[in-house]
Image (tube, grey):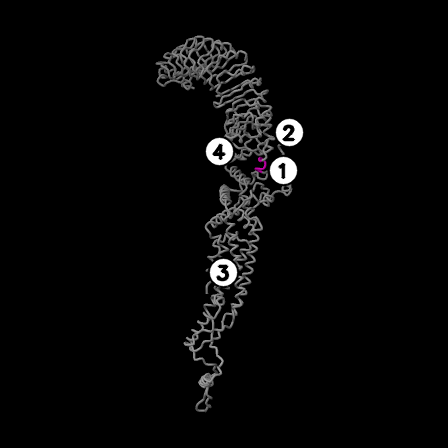
Amino acid sequence: MIPVTEFRQFSEQQPAFRVLKPWWDVFTDYLSVAMLMIGVFGCTLQVMQDKIICLPKRVQPAQNHSSLLNVSQAVASTTPLPPPKPSPANPITVEMKGLKTDLDLQQYSFINQMCYERALHWYAKYFPYLVLIHTLVFMLCSNFWFKFPGSSSKIEHFISILGKCFDSPWTTRALSEVSGEDSEEKDNRKNNMNRSNTIQSGPEGSLVNSQSLKSIPEKFVVDKSTAGALDKKEGEQAKALFEKVKKFRLHVEEGDILYAMYVRQTVLKVIKFLIIIAYNSALVSKVQFTVDCNVDIQDMTGYKNFSCNHTMAHLFSKLSFCYLCFVSIYGLTCLYTLYWLFYRSLREYSFEYVRQETGIDDIPDVKNDFAFMLHMIDQYDPLYSKRFAVFLSEVSENKLKQLNLNNEWTPDKLRQKLQTNAHNRLELPLIMLSGLPDTVFEITELQSLKLEIIKNVMIPATIAQLDNLQELSLHQCSVKIHSAALSFLKENLKVLSVKFDDMRELPPWMYGLRNLEELYLVGSLSHDISKNVTLESLRDLKSLKILSIKSNVSKIPQAVVDVSSHLQKMCIHNDGTKLVMLNNLKKMTNLTELELVHCDLERIPHAVFSLLSLQELDLKENNLKSIEEIVSFQHLRKLTVLKLWHNSITYIPEHIKKLTSLERLSFSHNKIEVLPSHLFLCNKIRYLDLSYNDIRFIPPEIGVLQSLQYFSITCNKVESLPDELYFCKKLKTLKIGKNSLSVLSPKIGNLLFLSYLDVKGNHFEILPPELGDCRALKRAGLVVEDALFETLPSDVREQMKTE
C-alpha cells in the first residue's frame, strides 16, 4: 500500500505559502486528495487481487455425421458411468462435480493473462493509473508557481516581509493609535484635510505649501507619554522593514510573471478538465462485468472461446462515476477562478479602504505582481494587507524615524550641545540628523536653532514652547512648517539664515515673517533671479533691517529695492560674478552699511555717493585699481568706516584728506607703494590697516592721529619707523611684522596702552628694555621670536609673563 504522504512533494513545501492560496485553491487541493485516493485505491486493487477470471466457452454441436460421431464419443467419454451400488464392505462417497475441462492451473493462468491483454478494454485496465496521473498533474499545476525559480523567489521574499510586517510592534502601534481616535475626530478628518489646503489663502498670503500639513497629520505627532512603548531594537527592525518594502516594491512592480504563471496554470487545468470529462464520459461504459474472449490458443488449451469475469468492473464503474463527479466540481472551480482572474483588474491594487479606515492618506496604490499578491492575500485574510500597508506609507515611516530620533536625542543630551553664537545667543546646532527631534522644543531657554544638512524637517506647532527663540538657521535643509508654528515665527523670529544648493530649498513661508529683522541667504541663484516670483514677496518683510545675499546675482533684484525704505544694512557677496546696474542703490536712502564683496567692480559705483546715511562701506575683493572717485565721499558726512582691502589699488589720492569723518580705514592687500601725507589729515582715524602692500616709508605726519588705536603695516618693505608714531598715545595694537626693520625705538615705551605688538619677521637683534613701560603688554600679546624675547631684561620678561 502506498501512503498518501509520499505525494506531499507535489504540493506546497512551506506552510507559510498558505496565505497565497485562496479558498478555491484550498478546495481543489482537497478534491485532488480525494481523486488521489481513488487512484491509489484502484492501483492497490490491481496489484493485490486477480484482475480477470476466464472459463472455456462450450460450442453448440454441428449437424453432420462426423460431428455427431465426435460428439457421441465425447459424450461417451464425458458421460459418467452409473455409480456402483454401495455395499457394507465398500462404502462410496458421492462428490459434486461440474463440467470438466481437463485444464490445469497454469493453463487457466495463461488464459486469464491472454484474455486480460486481448479482450479487456484499455480503459477498464488502466483506469486507476489514469486517475493517479491526472491527479498528480492537477497537483503539479496548482503548485507550480510556488516551485518555479523565477516566481518562487519573489513569493518567498514577499511572505518573509509580510510575516515580519504583520508581527511588527510598529504595525500594532500605528493601527492602535488610529483605532484609538475619537469617533468625532474620524468624522472630521476629511474636513480637516480639505481645509489644510486653504489655511494659507487668508490675508497673510500663500505661506505654507499644501504638502506641509499633509505630510505629517496631527495624529502622527509623536506622543511623549508613549515614546517608550517601542524600544530601540524594535525601532531599528521596523526601520529596516521600511527599506526592505521599498526595495521589494521597486523590484516586483517591474513585471507580472506571477500573474501570468497563475493564469497559465489555471487555463491548463481547465483544458485538462475538459479532456478528462470528454473521454471519461465516452469510455466509462466500457467497464463491463463479463467479457467474451476469443483468442487462438486452441493448440495449447484445446479451447478458443472463453467467457471472462472482470472481478473489479463493478467497483471501477462506481469509482469512475465518483471520479467524474470530483473532476466536474474541480473543473467548475477552475472556471470560477478564470472568471475571477479576468473579471477583476488584478494587476492593480488600491488601498482606498485602508486609507479611509486609518486616515493615512499617503499609502500608494501598487501594480503588477505586487498588486496580484495582495489580491491573493485578501482572499486569505484582508488584515494582512491592512497591516502591510503601514510600511508603504511615508507618513508612517517619518513617524517611526521621529520616534527613534526622540529616543536617541533626549533633552539632557541636547542641552550638552548648547553654545553661544556670534550674536551672543544661546544656540543649539544639529547637523546631519534624519529629522528634527521633538525633544528640541522642551529646551525652553533656547534662543537660536541651527539645522544643517537635515532632510524633510517638519517644524510642528510645539515650537511655540520656545518663548526665547529669536534666530533660526537652515543650512541645506528641506523644511515644512505647521500653520500654528508659522504664526509663532511671524511674531517671534528676528533672524533667519538659509543656506541652499537648490532654490527649491528656499522655504516659501519665509516671505511672510513680518517681524523678521535679519535675513541671510547663501546659495547659487540664477542670473535672472530678479525675475523670480518668490523674491517679490520680500516687500512683506516690513521689519527687515539687514539683508545679506551670498550668491551670483548679476544685478540687485527689484524685490530688494522694495524693502529699501527700512533696510539699514545690505551685503552682497557675489563670488566673482560681475555686478552691474547699481542705480537701484540710490533708492536705499536709509542704508547705513553696504558691503559689495567679490563683485568684480572696477570703479567705485557712483550710486554709492547718493547714500547720505551711509556709515560703513566695504568693497572687499573687487578689481579696483584707481579710486579717484573717493573725493565724492566728502558728501557722505556720516561715513566712518571705509574698507577697500583685497583689491589692486596702486596709490591713494590726495582727496582722501576731505574724508574727515573716517574712523576706520583699511587698504590692506593692495599694491600701494607710497603713503600720501594728506592721509593723516583724517585725524579721527582710530583704525588704520595698511598691511600686505609695497610701502617703504611711513610719513612723520602719522603723529597727527592722536585717536589711533590700531595700526598695521605687516608684510610691507618698511625699513624704519618715524618717532612721531609714538606720539599716538592711545595705540593698543601695533603690527609691524614681516618688514625690513632693524631697530625698534626706545620711545615705544610711551605707548602705555599697548596690549598687542607684532615685530616678528624683521631684522631686530635686540628689543628695547623700555617695552617694560608698556604695562598692558603681556607675553601672549607680544609676537616675536623666542630668541629675541630673551634679549629683554629678566624683570621685563617676568613682568610680561605675569597675568
Q: Can residue 237 be seen by looking at this rendering?
A: no
The residue carrying mark 2 is 203
The residue carrying mark 3 is 134
* Magenta-highlighted residues: 211-216
Amino acid under disc 4: Met
The residue carrying mark 4 is 432
Amino acid under disc 3: His
Comes first in the chain, label 3 or label 4: 3
| Dot 2 and dot 4 residues touching (CB under 8 Å) | no
Task: Estimate the spatial distance between the alpha carbons at disc 3 and disc 1, rounded to whole Å.
Answer: 59 Å
Q: Residue 89 in the image: state x and y as whole percent.
A: 44, 91
The residue carrying mark 1 is 194
Task: Estimate the spatial distance between the alpha carbons at disc 2 and disc 1, rounded to whole Å.
Answer: 19 Å
Numbered badge on residue 42: none
Kindly identify the residue that appears in the image at 47 percent across and 19 percent down.
622
The quarter holding residue 204 reads: top right
